[in-house]
Each structure stands twice: as C-alpha cells, then as structure tokens.
Image (cartoon, helix red, strand yellow):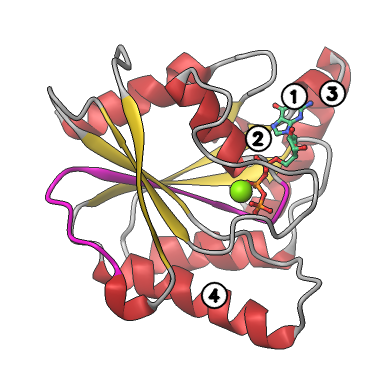
Amino acid sequence: MIVKSSIFKTSVVKSDDILNLEMPEFAFVGRSNVGKSSLINALAGKNKLAKTSSTPGYTKFVNYFIFNEKERPFALIDLPGYGFSKTGKQNILLWSELITSYFENSQNLKCVFVLVDSRIEPTEKDLQMIKYLYANNIPFKVVATKTDKLSKAQLSKNLKAIASTLKITTNNIISTSSEKKENINLILDIIENFMN
Ligand code: GTP
Ligand code: MG
C-alpha cells in the first residue's frame, strides 16, 4: 500500500472522549520507549508526525493519526506506553484505564500491533496485553523493534526468547527498524489486508 498522506487528528485524554472515526483503526501498544511513535512516523514516511523522545513515558494520551484521508482512509492510534513511569502510580493506573477504554470503545479496531524491543525480554505486562487481546478476540501482531541495534545472530537468538516468553512462534513476530526503515512495508501490507 502507498501512503499518500498522513495527518495528526487529535489527542484524547479522557476515556469518555474516545472517538468513533468510522474508518478502520490500527493501534500501537507496548512499553514506554519501545518505539511506537517512531514506527508511526516510519509508516508515514515523516520524521515528526508523532512526537518521539528518548525519555520513557512520552506519549501520555491516545493520539489519532489519519492516513490517506482522501482515498481509503484508515487511522493509526498511538497509545500511551505501559510499565514505566516517573510520575507515580496514579498515572500508570490512569494510562492503563485509557488503554482499556480505547479497546472497549473502538468500534472499528481491526488489529493491534504489540511492540516489543528486540534487545529486551518482554515483560509480564506484554504477556498480560497479549492475553487480554486474545481473550477479547482482538486481532494482534507482535512487532520487534530497533533491530538495527543487533547483529543477525543476536536478533535470531532474541526472537526465539521473545517468542518463548510470549508463548507464540517466531514466524509470528515481525522484525522492524524504524531507523533503517526495515520491514515497514510489511506492516503496511498487514494494514491493507485488514482493510479488504
Ligand atoms: P513512549 O511514548 O514513551 O511510550 O515511547 P514510544 O514507544 O513512542 O517510543 P519512541 O518512538 O518515542 O522511541 C523511543 C526512543 O527509541 C527514541 O529515542 C527513538 O529515536 C528510539 N527508536 C525508536 N525506534 C528505533 C529504531 O528502529 N532504531 C533505533 N536505533 N532507535 C529507535
Ligand atoms: Mg510515544
């Protein structure tokens, strides 16, 4: 699929304000700093559509981006990161409520991309997320990020460990690098398939 346009639509702070956009939606979740916003930028072919930061916990709200608005529009949703917060327990709870509320209220959610850092063992929260999606019949794909930081051998070893922790097989993990634009087209292919 060719991305012809991408815009930031809005940022939702409260559960009650989750949008109904009437177009297919694809959400990005994962621990803070895993590379969700960077992946959305890579998909858009832009550097600064979604704001990124090396400080974990940067995206705090539900951010909506609309792609190909004039043709077959679809929305990408940048969800707050989980599992890392410098702002206290209250915020972690609020964030997870916002994420849950997004899943419960999005009528057109087609697929969730669950991002895991290819260098780091997935956490209990990643496993919880996958179990939640599975239990609620929400289609999901696991995406390993930042593969440019690893050698081929290290990547292959880590993918096995990630698959084992998440109780999936390695061919169910899409390895990506937003930095080097690797396999970004595979994510676009998945999006396209869900739209047909
Ligand atoms: P939160 O908004 O805090 O939840 O984080 P996020 O998941 O949106 O992560 P973000 O995209 O802001 O990226 C975090 C850091 O990782 C930034 O410093 C990015 O430049 C870096 N990063 C993201 N993707 C890649 C990648 O593919 N390769 C490399 N080398 N760095 C990356
Ligand atoms: Mg972010």
Tag 2 and tag 3, C-beta contact below 8 Å: no
Do residues under tags 1 and 2 come within 8 Å of each other at their CB atoms? Answer: yes
Residue drawn at the location 29% of the way across and 73% of the way down: 17
Mark 1 within 8 Å of ligand 1, using the beta carbon: yes
**Comes first in the chain, label 4 or label 2:** 4
Q: Secondary structure at mark 1?
A: helix
In-front residue for pair 10/23: 10
Q: Which of these two is toward me, 153 or 126?
A: 126
Residue designated by label 4: 96
Which disc, if any, is residue 144?
A: 2
* Cα–Cα span, label 1 and label 2: 7 Å
- Mark 3: is the Cβ under 8 angstroms from ligand 1? yes
27 falls in the magenta region: yes
Residue 67, picture quadrant: top left
**Hey, which quadrant is residue 35 in on the image?**
top right
Please tell me which residue lies in front, 187 or 16: 16
- Residue bearing the label numbered 3: 149
The residue type indicated by label 4 comes to Ser
Q: Name the N-terminal-most of marks 3 and 4.
A: 4
CB-based contact (under 8 Å), mark 3 and mark 1: yes
Which amino acid, by three-letter code, is at mark 2?
Answer: Ala
State the residue at coordinates (70%, 60%).
57
What range of the chain is rendered magenta?
A: 18-33
Amino acid type of disc 1? Thr
Q: Which residue is mark 1?
A: 147
Q: Position of residue 186 (x, y in %)?
A: 45, 19
Q: Secondary structure at mark 2?
A: strand
